[in-house]
Image (cartoon, helix red, strand yellow):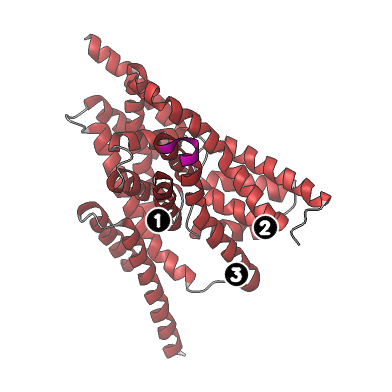
């Protein structure tokens, strides 16, 4: 079962090249990479159909970890089983690993240079703006859902993390627990109505 | 052992970072800055800046950056492996479940509670970064202006974030050099 046929070898090679290429040229996070994956694996290679790609996106998003890595795992399993998963993950993580290793080695020299330090300092203001912009977009979605529970969770989570410095992991676990309780109650409510 | 603590720190980051990208940021800050003191807040902010400029998920970038700085290539590999292992296990399991059942009820409810939480966590991390960028020691007027301009441009024109950041970097350099000459 773990023997790799020549047909599989070809798929694995194609899978590695595709994921490596996508990962190396995708700036700007999970959703961008998913768009690239769709155009490669659905439109070009026809390994996955459109509906399944949507499901892969949802799963990759809801599971813990980086969306790009999660999507690579799902595409890898689908394309070539266990080895496909390994190859797709390697292809996805190697480009950032190579680039960041090089940057980290030169970081000290890089950061102590006055001009570079000034550029980085200005960019920090830009990063803060990018993050606040993301928060505005996401926060608006939450407020637009007009759910009192969601609004309450958002406020409580902010107080817990920012003012009370509660461990982030406990906050996430509390949110998961709330979700489970909510689904139990709504199911109960539905069965009582029937 | 540094390799083991790198592995377990990033294992936790990989395990609890739900929602990708920015959601991982507060977890990374907590593990690398607060608990282990591998980075200062300023170095962490540089890391986020570098991660934004380079391709790849921020958690992988952070794992490689911190791992290389603390323990060389082996450190980078142990941190990155720790970071992706939870994904490999959980997502492979989900892939199996998905093929078997194809619909997960109850899951939507959990997600609906996670989403607002994630927004709050990102906001908190954003404030920490803004403080480093603008109020470090004394108020930095140039950076405060850059932040406001960048925010407006991003919100109004939906400009590419990488372009906005690069322009902030260039504008910061020019403005600071002019300020020093004056």
Q: Check contact, mark 1 vs mark 2: CB within 8 A.
A: no
Local SS, label 3: helix
Kindly identify which chain the residue marked by label 1 belongs to.
A
Left or right position of A136 against B3: left
Where does the image place residue A106, in percent across and percent down from the top left?
44, 25
Local SS, label 1: helix
Q: Mark on residue B135?
A: none
Where does the image place residue B172, in percent across and percent down from the top left?
32, 22
Task: List the residue tagged with mark 1.
Answer: A141
Counting residues from the start of the chain, the first of labels 1 and 2 encountered is 2
Q: Nearer the viewer, mark 1 or mark 2?
A: 2
Spatial CA distance of label 1 from label 2 is 37 Å
In this view, B181 is above or below B70? above
Q: Residues within 10 Å of mark 2 (few under 14, many from 20)?
A: some
Spatial CA distance of label 3 from label 1 is 29 Å
Q: Which residues are magenta?
A: B71-76
The residue nearer to you, when weighing A183 against A115, is A115
Q: Are marks 3 and 1 on the same chain?
A: no
Left or right position of B45 against A72: left
Q: Residues within 10 Å of mark 3 (few under 14, many from 20)?
A: few
| Residue B72 located within the stretch drawn in magenta | yes
Q: Nearer the viewer, mark 2 or mark 3?
A: 2
Task: List the residue tagged with mark 3.
Answer: B97
Task: List the residue tagged with mark 2.
Answer: A82
Q: Residue at x 29, y 38 (%)?
A: B41
| Residue B142 located within the stretch drawn in magenta | no
Where does the image place residue B69, in percent across and percent down from the top left?
41, 34
- Name the image quarter holding the N terminus of chain A: bottom right
């Amino acid at each position: 079962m773990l023997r790799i046929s020549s047909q599989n070898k070809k798929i694995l090679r194609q899978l590695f090249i595709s994921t490596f290429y996508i990962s190396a040229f995708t700036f700007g996070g999970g959703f961008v990479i998913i768009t690239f994956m769709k155009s490669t694996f659905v439109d070009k290679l026809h390994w996955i159909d459109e509906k399944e790609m949507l499901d892969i996106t949802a799963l990759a998003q809801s599971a813990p970890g980086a969306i790009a890595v999660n999507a690579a795992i799902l595409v890898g399993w689908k394309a070539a089983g266990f080895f496909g998963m390994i190859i797709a993950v390697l292809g996805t993580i190697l480009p950032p690993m190579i680039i960041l290793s090089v940057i980290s080695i030169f970081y000290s020299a890089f950061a102590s240079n006055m001009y570079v330090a000034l550029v980085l300092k200005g960019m920090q203001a830009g990063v803060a703006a990018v993050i606040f912009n993301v928060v505005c977009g996401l926060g608006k979605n939450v407020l637009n859902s007009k759910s009192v529970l969601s609004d309450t969770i958002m406020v409580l989570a902010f107080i817990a993390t920012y003012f009370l410095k509660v461990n982030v992991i406990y906050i996430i676990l509390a949110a998961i627990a709330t979700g489970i309780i909510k689904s139990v109650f709504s199911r109960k409510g539905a069965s009582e109505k029937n | 052992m540094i390799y083991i603590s790198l592995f377990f720190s990033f294992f936790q980051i990989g395990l609890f970072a739900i929602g990708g990208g920015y959601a991982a940021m507060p977890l990374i800050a907590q593990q690398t800055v607060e608990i282990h003191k591998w980075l200062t807040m300023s170095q962490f902010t540089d890391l986020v800046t570098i991660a934004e400029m380079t391709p790849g998920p921020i958690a992988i970038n952070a794992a490689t950056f911190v791992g290389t700085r603390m323990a060389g290539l082996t450190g980078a590999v142990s941190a990155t492996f720790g970071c992706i292992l939870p994904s490999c296990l959980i997502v492979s399991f989900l892939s199996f479940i998905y093929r078997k059942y194809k619909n997960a009820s109850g899951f939507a409810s959990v997600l609906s509670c996670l989403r607002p939480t994630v927004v709050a966590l990102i906001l908190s991390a954003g404030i920490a970064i803004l403080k480093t960028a603008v109020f470090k020691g004394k108020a930095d007027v140039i950076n405060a202006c850059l932040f406001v301009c960048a925010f407006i441009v991003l919100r109004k024109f939906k400009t590419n974030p990488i372009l906005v950041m690069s322009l902030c970097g260039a504008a910061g350099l020019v403005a600071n050099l002019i300020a020093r000459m004056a």
